[in-house]
Image: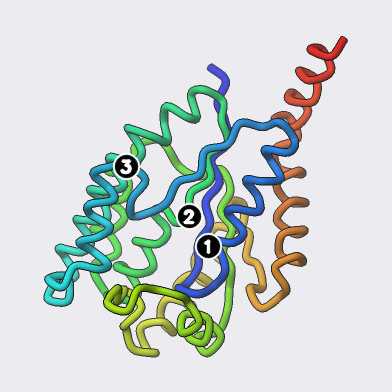
Amino acid sequence: MSRGAFITFEGSEGCGKSTQVKRLASRLEQAGVPVLITREPGGTAIGEKIRDLLQFAPESFAMAPETELLLFEASRSQLVRETIRPALEQESVVISDRFFDSTTVYQGVARKLEPGIVEKLNEFAVGAERPDLTFILDVNVATARARMLRRVRPVQALDRMEQEPLEFYERVCEGYRELARREPTRIYLLDGSLSPDEIESKIWREVSARFPAILALRKKGDTARAS
């Protein structure tokens, strides 16, 4: 059975990944490729409720790390089965703003939960739906914090994940770098301090090189319809 491509974007808060998700989707759509954008936590009605609980609900500030881990996995398992898997089966390119690498780093490294348990729960939640390509935007903690402070939010919409101390985000950044060292075939590490245009160009070159068949088939189909 033919299948679409699954691309994920990762990095610390304020790294610029959400901007690049939109830019890549726009490029693919201009090339005639069907695209689905999703995000974690969220992406489904159930997932969005979990997202609000994890990030914005006042009660979330008392949340235990183990509870946090299980809620992320619950959102992810619903997203895979309700949204990601059906889209891939329809030969769409799925682009996700975060996926299981976030849990590996945020809960397994930064929260210091048992890595083996985190890995098992990730495997249980996603099944066979692993990313084909993951972009990590790497920025230093000072840059990330400065960008977070510039974000426009409603006055009372405090994001719990953005309230963590600098040491937490230092562990996050190093956790992502270690992931890139461990999985160089799947993960492409990008310098997040480059301009958005430079990052976009690097991402497009990598996507074009990794998935030439998807772009070629789409162009071939367009040519056939025009003739």
Pointer 3 residue: 44
- Pick whichever of labels 2 and 1 is earlier in the sequence: 2
**Of marks 3 and 2, the one in the foreground:** 3
- Residue 124 seen anywhere in this rendered image of the structure: no
Q: Nearer the viewer, residue 119 or 57?
A: 57
Front residue (pair 116, 221): 221
Q: Secondary structure at mark 2?
A: strand
Q: Secondary structure at mark 3?
A: loop
Quadrant of the drawing holding the C terminus? top right
Q: Quadrant of residue 51?
A: bottom left
Residue type, numbered disc 1: Arg
Left or right of residue 69: residue 98:
right
| Distance of label 1 from label 3 (alpha carbons) | 31 Å
Identify the element where label 1 is drawn. helix
Q: Hey, what amino acid is under mark 2? A: Asp
The image quadrant that residue 166 belongs to is bottom left
- Please tell me which residue lies in front, 161 or 181: 161
Residue linked to disc 2? 97
Q: Amino acid at mark 3?
A: Thr
Q: Residue at the spot x=62%, y=52% of the render?
A: 185
Horizontally, residue 66 falls left or right of residue 35, namely: left
Task: Classify residue 201 as left or right of residue 84.
Answer: right
Answer few, some or many: residues within 10 Å of disc 1's Cα (few below 14, many 20 plus, some between 14 and 19). Answer: few
| Whether residue 183 is situated above or below residue 153 in the rendered picture | above
Q: Residue 40, can we see it?
A: yes
Relative to residue 82, is residue 64 depicted above or below? below
Q: Is residue 80 left or right of residue 113?
A: right
